[in-house]
Image (tube, grey):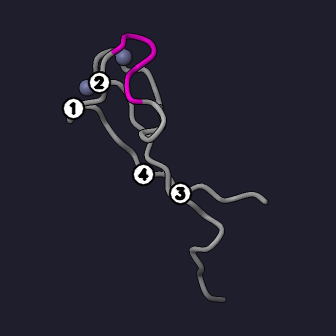
Amino acid sequence: MPEKEVGTSIVYLWACHECGAGSYNVSSTLACPNCYHYRCTHCAVERHRIPNHH
Ligand SMILES: [Zn+2]
Ligand SMILES: [Zn+2]
């Protein structure tokens, strides 16, 4: 059975390195709503593959 990538999308979630809050979507949340820290290179970013539901 062939593995297909269709039906999934990649999202990048980041966690605030200042207060540890998260996770926030990289594309929709620029700054931490908890402490107003803007995402920087120290903030951890994780790649997640989520299935699309239609
Ligand atoms: Zn924060
Ligand atoms: Zn940071």
Position of residue 48 relative to residue 41, above or below, is: below
Q: Secondary structure at mark 1?
A: loop
The kind of residue on which mark 4 rests is Arg
The three-letter amino acid code for the residue at tag 1 is His
- Judging by the rendered image, the residue that carries numbered circle 3 is 49
Q: How far apart in space, not on screen, are marks 2 and 1 (Cα)?
A: 6 Å
Q: Is residue 8 left or right of residue 27?
A: right
Q: Horizontal placement of 52 versus 42: left or right?
A: right
Whichever of labels 4 and 1 marks the residue nearer the N terminus, that label is 1
Which label number is shown at residue 17? Answer: 2
In the orientation shown, which residue stands out farthest toward the right? Answer: 54
- Is residue 54 placed above or below 3 in the rendered structure? above
The picture places residue 34, in percent across and down from the top left corner, at 44, 12
Q: Earlier in the sequence, mark 2 or mark 3?
A: 2
Query: Alpha carbon of mark 2 to alpha carbon of mark 4: how far?
Result: 17 Å
Disc 1 designates what residue?
42
Q: Position of residue 28 (x, y in %)?
A: 48, 36
